[in-house]
Image (cartoon, coloured by chain):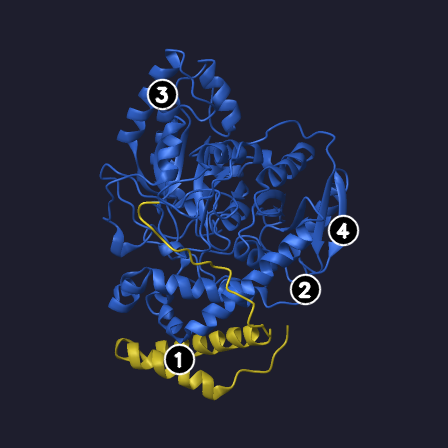
Amino acid sequence: MNPVFRTVRELAEAVRSRRVSPVELTEAFLDRLETLGSRYNAVVTVTRQRALVEARRAEGEIAAGGWRGPLHGIPYGAKDLLATAGGIPTTWGAAPLRTQTFDSDATVIGRLEQAGAVLVAKLAMVELAGGMGYRQPNASFTGPGISPWGRDAWSGGSSSGSGSAVAAGLVPFAIGSETWGSILSPAANCGVSGLRPTYGRVSRHGAMALCWTLDKLGPLALNADDCGLVLDAIAGPDPHDPTAAARPFRYDGSEVVGRRFRFGVIRDVAATAEDPVREAFSRSLEVLRKIGTVEEVTLADLPYEAITRTILMAEAASAFEDMIESGAIAGLTAPEDRFTAYARDAILAKDYIKALRLRAFVVREADRVLSEFDALVAPGRPAVASALDREFRSAARGNVPDIMGAIGNAAGLPAIAVPNGVSEAGLPTSLQFMGRAWEENTVLAAARAWQGITDYHLHHPPEVSYLA
Amino acid sequence: MSQPAPDPSEIDLRFELVRFRYGNRLTAEQLDVLRRSVAAIVEQVDALRTVRLTNADEPLQRFAAFRADE
């Protein structure tokens, strides 16, 4: 069996029924990471030694009848801001930290190990998760992330390698992180599914802090169902992270055929999107009417983007105070990352607190609107992947509107981006479903229903299909 | 939401702090970029100021008293 582009659910059944062994599976993906990873600047470290130990353990346990569940023996990659023990570097994508190591695993890595998953790679990312204000793709010491859909197409960021490695069939699933757009953007640019869980659903312990009140960890995979399987393994409280909620989560992967949904669309949400994105979104709304209703909604007039951006800029400046004030940021890759964070000293304490006070209004307004719907839908990203040598537009920097991202991240709401088309230039477009807090199962169900009546998620980059 | 253009004097005052703290590390070109960044921050903060809050409108973050033995 060729494991490339098989879903986690398919691989799990093959492993459980012993049609494929975890060691074979792990070796196949290790080989792909080592031969193709550099083609997409997707990998920081291939964790071959650790992976084979974990795979052999899984193989022995399964042979002894101890199958732990759908991730047992399944290889995966982790964004390189998740701490890993055993001397494996955790670089945060930043040249000055390329030899940084930690003594223990991040909670998410530990949870996946408990589930029997096999860590095969630390995946490339934008330096410091983009917190220094990068403007173009070449902002990582591993080079600009490349989307498998085009040699000159950016993979998105900041979870660049998490998107491109899944899209290129280098791993069955990956873990990324989002502060504002860092899971949805690479999912969109790489034509895969990416789930941003509710803030507090997944422990951040052992993950690089960019913004304490905005950072979320979540999976990228070939489809929404796989995202649910992974979330099931990584969600839950953690004594090491007081923001990790005690609310229980169990993925509900039950049948969605016949289920009807209520979708909301914020007025003009796609008005400033690029033509291929807007056209794909318009077509998607027609398709969504087959599985539910679509209604336009209007939000209270609030400076959503300014609120989220102020919180992000202030917290990131504080989180990296040592690197900024010492001048260590001069060693970063992107020229703009070497100094633009200095401007954030111009944000006053009062500005930050005003943003936090206004955030309470955002949270209530988002919940008011979402209480009427299963999900708000919008383009996953307003543009297709930009060229590697081009400056891109970014809501986090303030030169493109992103009301869904501003609200979703300020309010900590779950959202999933799934493919919804391919542009004339051969680049994927994407659709997002954003739900009420703690309603991951609802947005996953909507996304699975979408993927039940469309086949965009079954398409893979032409060159990678050939290489597979 | 629309708001008036930021007051240049506020931009200058906030930029002076940045220049005072980091100016010796920066080129003239980088300082120009930073001044534009500070202008964007002031514009962003002006957007926050357009919303009037009352004394009862608390920050979303809540402080919790702490005891190590609980």
Q: Is residue B17 left or right of residue A400?
A: left
Depth check, mark 1 against mark 2: the one in front is 2
On screen, A73 above or below A173? Answer: above
For marks 2 and 4, give the CA distance. 16 Å
Residue A317: where, in percent of width, then height?
37, 65
Q: Which mark is residue B32?
A: 1
Amino acid type, callout 1: Asp
Q: Which residue is mark 3?
A: A58
Q: Dot 4 falls on which chain? A: A
What hue represents chain A?
A: blue
Q: Which mark is residue A300?
A: 2
Q: Are marks 2 and 4 in contact (CB under 8 Å)?
A: no
Secondary structure of the residue carrying numbered label 4: strand
The CA distance from mark 2 to mark 3 is 52 Å
The circle on residue A378 is: none
Q: Chain of mark 1?
A: B
Which chain is mark 3 on? A
User: Considering only vertical position in the picture, is A29 above or below A132?
Assistant: above
Label 1 SS: helix
* Label 3 crowd (10 A; few <14 / some 14-19 / many >=20): many
